């Protein structure tokens, strides 16, 4: 199931898994809860669902291990944000779509560290913008009341 990605813009090179792969980040989970979900799927199927979706950039597979197969719930995300560090062995796998071959370059910094830094900066900027907006609102409201 390969979707038509001609109109997807910058993410078009991430379609169909030919130029992208899923990078699993151990000890990471997402706090975002409004992502589309599929149930009773394996981690491999979850990764393939994200690879074949042009708008998907990350996937979270939460599972219960039943012997040699792990079936669970798969959440597909359009934004890599809101991730937090969790204890290993938490029963979930967070996977991020990256350009194919980027995990094997030894001369570049670790992709995992880069993703965590970018997500941390984006989350920090969102918090600063919200707090700044609230401060502006209250200052503006106080001036109008005087």
Image (cartoon, helix red, strand yellow):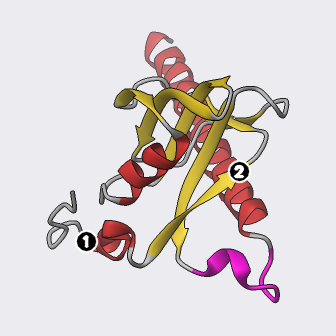
Q: Nearer the viewer, residue 10 or 17?
A: 17
Residue closest to the eye, 60 or 119? 60
Sequence-first tag of 2 and 1: 1
Residue 129 horizontal side relative to residue 55, left or right: right
- In this picture, which residue range is highlighted in magenta? 101-109
The image quarter containing residue 88 is top right
Predominant secondary structure, magenta span: loop
- SS category of the residue bearing label 2: strand
Q: Residue at x 63, y 79 (%)?
A: 102
Residue 9, numbered circle: 1
Up-down relation of residue 53 to residue 7 (above or below): above
- Badge 2 density bin: few <14, some 14–19, many ≥20, Cα 10 Å: some
Q: Magenta segment: does it hold 24? A: no
Q: Which mark is residue 110?
A: none
Helix, strand or loop for disc 1: helix
Find residue 76 and report its image quarter.
Answer: top left
The answer to whether residue 48 is above or below residue 135 is: below
Residue 116, how many percent across, how many down? 72, 54
Give me the residue at 29% from left, 72% from top. Answer: 12
Image position, residue 81 (x, y; %): 56, 43
| Position of residue 13 measured from the top left corner of the image (x, y, whole percent) | 34, 77
Answer with left or right where residue 45 lies relative to residue 86. Answer: left
Residue 79 can be seen in this image? no
Q: Is residue 91 left or right of residue 2?
A: right
Where is residue 10 shown, x and y percent of the image?
33, 72
Q: Residue at x 56, y 55 (%)?
A: 96
Which residue in the rendered view is the most extreme toward the top?
A: 145
The crowd level at tag 1 (other Cα within 10 Å; few <14, some 14-19, many 20+) is few
In front: label 2 or label 1: 2
Instruction: Give the residue at mark 2.
Output: 25
């Amino acid at each position: 199931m390969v979707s038509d990605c001609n109109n997807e813009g910058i993410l078009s090179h991430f379609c169909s898994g030919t130029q992208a792969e899923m990078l699993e980040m151990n000890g990471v989970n997402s706090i975002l809860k409004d992502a589309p979900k599929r149930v009773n799927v394996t981690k491999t199927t979850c990764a393939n669902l994200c690879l074949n979706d042009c708008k998907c950039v990350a996937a979270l597979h939460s599972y219960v291990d039943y012997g040699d197969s792990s079936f669970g719930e798969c959440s597909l995300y359009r934004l890599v944000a809101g991730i937090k560090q969790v204890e290993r062995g938490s029963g979930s796998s967070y996977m991020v779509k990256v350009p194919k071959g980027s995990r094997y370059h030894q001369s570049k910094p670790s992709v995992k560290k880069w993703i965590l830094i970018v997500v941390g900066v984006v989350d920090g900027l969102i918090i600063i913008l919200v707090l700044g907006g609230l401060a502006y609102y209250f200052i503006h409201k106080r001036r109008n009341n005087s």
